[in-house]
Image: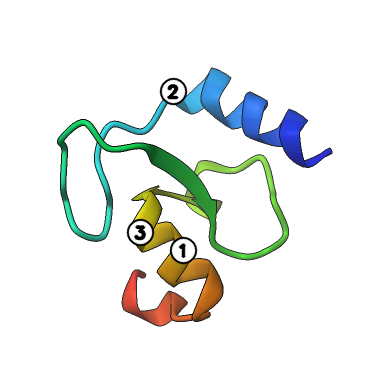
């Protein structure tokens, strides 16, 4: 499921330490954001994003700004 896939992503690709979009590397929380919506086990289908950028990416559907 959703949680298991995120566990798999963290296991194989590690925990994100900076944001792909804004490049911030401070003590924020970082997420793995899925690009395609298909949640594939493929590193090219994921982005490291800080929480504010992840919310913008998901809620505004502005994926073209990040890729």
**Circle 1 — which element?**
helix
| Disc 3: CA contacts within 10 A as few (<14), some (14-19) or many (>=20) | few
Instruction: State how far apart marks 1 and 2 are (Cα).
Output: 21 Å
Q: Are marks 2 and 3 in contact (CB under 8 Å)?
A: no
Q: Which of 62 and 27 is in front in this view?
A: 27
Residue 30 image offset from top left, x and y in percent? 37, 39
| Disc 2: CA contacts within 10 A as few (<14), some (14-19) or many (>=20) | few
Q: In this rendering, which labeled residue sits more in front, label 1 or label 2?
A: 1
Q: Are marks 1 and 3 in contact (CB under 8 Å)?
A: yes
> Residue at the location (49% across, 81% down)?
60
Badge 2 is on which residue? Answer: 14
Badge 1 is on which residue? Answer: 55
Q: Which of 21 and 30 is in front in this view?
A: 30
Ranked by sequence position, the earlier of labels 1 and 2 is 2
Quadrant of the rendering where the C terminus is positioned: bottom left
Badge 3 is on which residue? Answer: 52
Ranked by sequence position, the earlier of labels 2 and 3 is 2
């Amino acid at each position: 499921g959703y949680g298991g896939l995120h566990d798999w992503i963290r296991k194989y690709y590690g925990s994100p330490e900076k944001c792909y979009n804004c490049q911030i590397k401070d003590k924020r929380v970082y997420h793995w954001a899925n690009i395609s919506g298909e949640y594939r086990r493929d590193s090219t289908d994921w982005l490291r994003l800080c929480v504010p950028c992840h919310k913008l990416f998901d809620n505004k559907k502005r994926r073209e700004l990040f890729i």
